[in-house]
Image (cartoon, rainbow, N blue to C red):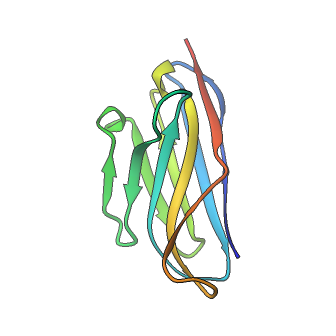
Amino acid sequence: QVQLVESGGGLVQTGGSLKLSCAASGSIRAVSAMEWYRQTPGLPRELVAGITNGGSTNYLDSAKGRFSISRDNAKNTVYLQMNSLKPADTAVYYCKAEILSDHADWADYWGQGTQVTVSP
């Protein structure tokens, strides 16, 4: 089985920083794209940042210049460094990874989510 476990969320003041981590584990053969999404109540989940296994990145416009996504392929882990945080960044953050495992063809797996709260 494949599992994604996130960590690093919490409460921070406006202008502060947080670093999220998401580690994939299990019977993994390969990992392709890894992404971070976020969701606030009543709104659809939105893509915040993504990174290919080659290192190419893309960002939500409001995250550009403040957030940085990176990955450690040896550890099957993706990170999201978030700086200059704003109250509008408050959400539950989820990681997603496209994974080939011993038990299944390529499929998307999601983490359980981690709460990020930015106080005014």
Q: Is residue 88 left or right of residue 12?
A: left
Q: Nearer the viewer, residue 104 or 57?
A: 104
In the image, residue 92 sits, relative to residue 5, either above or below, namely above
In the image, residue 19 sits, relative to residue 35, either above or below, namely above
Q: Residue at x 45, y 56 (%)?
A: 35
In the image, residue 51 sits, relative to residue 62, either above or below, namely below
Q: Quadrant of the N terminus?
A: bottom right
Q: Nearer the viewer, residue 52 or 91?
A: 91
Q: Residue furthest front?
A: 42
Q: What is the x, y in percent for residue 47? A: 40, 45
Q: Residue at x 60, y 71 (%)?
A: 75
Q: Nearer the viewer, residue 96 or 76?
A: 96
Q: What is the x, y in percent for residue 50? A: 39, 55
Q: Residue at x 45, y 27 (%)?
A: 84
Q: Residue furthest bottom?
A: 102
Q: What is the x, y in percent for residue 39? A: 52, 36
Residue 24 figure quarter = bottom right
Q: What is the x, y in percent for residue 27? A: 67, 82
Q: Residue furthest top?
A: 120
In the image, residue 45 sits, relative to residue 16, either above or below, namely below
Tally the marks: 0
Q: Quadrant of the C terminus?
A: top right
